[in-house]
Image (cartoon, helix red, strand yellow):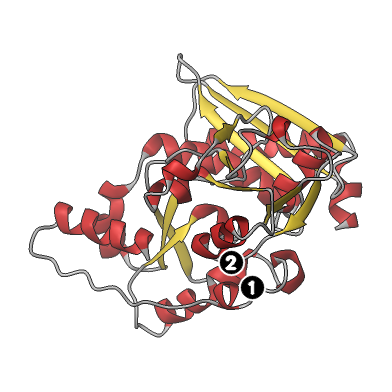
Amino acid sequence: MWQARHVQQRLRDLHPGCEVEILGMTTEGDRILDRALNEIGGKGLFTKELEVALLDGRADLAVHSLKDVPMELPEGFALAAVLRREDPRDAFVSPRYASLEELPEGAVLGTSSLRRAAQIRRRHPRLQVRPLRGNLDTRLAKLDRGEYDAIVLAAAGLERLGLVERIRGLLAPSVCLPAAGQGALGIEVRSGRPELLRWLAPLSDHETWLHVSAERAVSRVLGGSCRVPLAAYCESGPDGALHLRACVASVDGAHLLEAQARLQSPDAQGATRLGEQVAQDLLGQGAQAYLQAQ
């Protein structure tokens, strides 16, 4: 809802006098909280009902956390805008400990992400990494009740909801590589609505779109979903070149493959090709074995 209100206000500022109404919806991914996403159908559970609302005309656009948007949109839908990315890193949250390194052996760490779990297990095998579902308030309440010693959440979500004081530390990409699209908002519309594309175009951030295009290309080639411990993160260097890193891991974190590449003069097509190149590098290292095992 914060994301929807944020886009609502941005559109009102851009187009004075235009009324933007919010159609609040609860998706299946929001309702089923007792099982991990990889057990109940994946990220599409957060977008399906919204796409139905677009299709039947109840809504003109849908606002998503881009990391929750499937890499292949259903026929008849398009990604119209990607807003400027906020902090893409993962945040360490704990009332007692300041970092992963401070957690004692056997400490219980909660996360909803196979990606985070695999990377943390690889670096800190002494920890018990357990599933954690629910909205931010629910997850933080479970932490505060002592069900977990620490939890790991997306930093952007905490910052958006004014909960930055709960962050004890941010995990560098070298420690926990972010998910494709993490920290960015995407706006989805029905195809064949050129007036909406023109209306939404000023919201898009070109650099963020290049970054997430490269990241999502990695996931698309590898069939990435929440069933696969897959990470992809792209950033721009001082010279404007794109630097893309990606990894695929086994669920237990015992095995992890990494690949990276640079693109000196990026454009949209080049960013996509960069992601495809890195994905092919991972496949060449044997990533298919880990993808099939999930």
x, y percent for residue 113? 69, 53
x, y percent for residue 64? 46, 61
Q: Amino acid at mark 2?
A: Gly
- Residue topped by disc 1: 33
Picture residue at 67% right of the left edge, 25% below the top: 261
Q: Choose the circle earlier in sequence order: 1 or 2.
A: 1
- Residue topped by disc 2: 134
What's the distance in space between the residues labelled 1 and 2, CA to CA? 6 Å
Q: Amino acid at mark 1?
A: Leu
Q: Is residue 276 above or below residue 131?
A: above
Picture residue at 53% right of the left edge, 19% below the top: 264
**Is 252 positioned to the left or the right of 1 in the image?**
right
| Residue at the far bottom in the pictured view | 56
Q: Is residue 4 above or below residue 66?
A: below
On the question of residue 184 being in view, the answer is: no
Asked if labels 2 and 1 touch by Cβ distance under 8 angstroms, the answer is yes
Q: Quadrant of the N terminus?
A: bottom left
Query: Tag 2, which secondary structure?
Result: loop
Q: Quadrant of the C terminus?
A: bottom right
